[in-house]
Image (cartoon, rainbow, N blue to C red):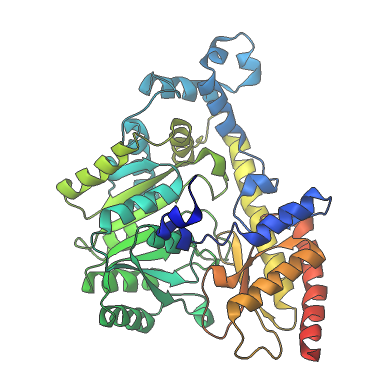
Amino acid sequence: MVKLTDVNSKLLKAHYAVRGKIVNRAQELEGKGRKIIYCNIGNPQALKQKPLTFVRQVLSLLEYPALMDAPESAKLFPADAVKRAKAILAHNPSGTGAYTQSAGIPFIRKAVADFIHHRDGIPADMNRVLLTDGASKGVQAAFTLLTNKENDGYMIPIPQYPLYSATIELYGAKQINYFLDEKAGWQLNEHELNASYEGAKKSGINPVAIAVINPGNPTGALLSHENIEMVIRFARKHRLAILADEVYQENVYAPGQKFVSFAKVMHDIGETETTLFSFHSVSKGFLGECGHRGGYMEVRNMSDDVYAELVKLQSIGLCSNVDGQIVTYLMVAPPVKGDESYELYVKERDGILNDLKEKAGILGRGLSSIPGMHIDVPQGAMYAFVRFELPGQAGADPAALDNDYCMNLLEETGICVVPGSGFGQAPGTLHFRTTFLPPKEDIKELVEKMKTFHAGYAAKLAKK
């Protein structure tokens, strides 16, 4: 029998905060009949977000193509959904049960390139697009490609999404933290980047890439064109690749703001030397198709021989799952005006995004009104990284403090959030990450329960 002492030490050291002991306890409580408001993970459809009708109609037809020829199909499916399913089968006649090309089905990679071109107004090459099982597999592929020596390191934001710290640990690389500037709306700070880089070099670490999450997870922040340009120039100066995690690009709520991709800024400034990996996913945005594990990675400024190694890596895993590839296609090539499904698609899309925007405001304004809590209304993504203060805790272990806080919050209120220490936080600060994905009434309930809980918890500590 394999013992824990036999397990890969890198796996033992890896941690993934959004699924841990607090979530396990939440599930235990739920099993005993307690109502739990799950705010620990960006899993929209588990929190009552409905799937888009068009996406599920096309998938249904492709999983059982005989439906397209059934007399009842005209009553069950709109004509454009049937037409789209037939077109996909014409391009991929083997159907959803067969392996595809390792890089992904060619016409879908072409659709991704067209999507990038129309989004940014810049050229995009389908032969630099790989279809992946969600963005996570693309990120891991980039780490596999770039990690060459034991002292290779990755600059990652703090706070960060734990995929990055866990992957660094699993791959035996070095983690190089750079702190996001909370006072400046969680933008990247050039002085901080330089200090982080120089500190790593002095420690014998060889930085090979910098990861950036935009819009931010867990911060909900949106990076400006100027901030992205600064990051690109920094990366070029230090010969770093850029990993641009852009899975929340559709989730932008701040008035007058819009998502700007690293690819667009790189094109705007004429940067042709710095390698860029850009990641997108069907799990977020307004699709919320987490379970279908679809996404893509677009690569820029990479030679043919190096890119061939990336495709070889993909071929070792054969290909990404076919349903995920199809959902990725439907994400980048939705119904257009004049199609039978267009009006319903737009209604569902806008309904989801407007609902998220409203809930971001309810959460941000509500929690920021609580004495001892600090949070701006999230500009994007699906999360808020809430800073909170506790009395008389100077010198205490922040991880112990925020874990105890979040566990007590769960026990008393049924609210399940993630301690800030799981994402990283500036020394001397305490945070928790919460989503605003649950239904609107649950978000309102969360705010009211937080007011009572935080005041009571702080009062108890003050008496000690």
Against 341, is 310 above or below?
A: below
* Residue 175: image location, x then y, percent: 38, 69
- Of 421 and 346, the residue lying toward us: 421
- Of 57 and 170, the residue lying toward us: 170
Residue 341 in view = no
Against 292, is 140 above or below?
A: below
Residue at (20% x, 43% y) in the render: 308
Residue at (38% x, 64% y) in the render: 211
Res. 201 image quadrant: bottom left
In the image, 152: left or right of 280? left
In the image, 102: left or right of 303? right
Residue 403 in view = yes
* Residue 278: image location, x then y, percent: 36, 54
In the image, 109: left or right of 402? left
* Residue 274: image location, x then y, percent: 23, 63
Q: Residue furthest front?
A: 1
Total labels drawn: 0
Residue at (63% x, 49% y) in the render: 44
Res. 142 image quadrant: bottom left
* Residue 332: image location, x then y, percent: 44, 41
Residue at (78% x, 65% y) in the render: 411
Q: Quadrant of the C terminus?
A: bottom right
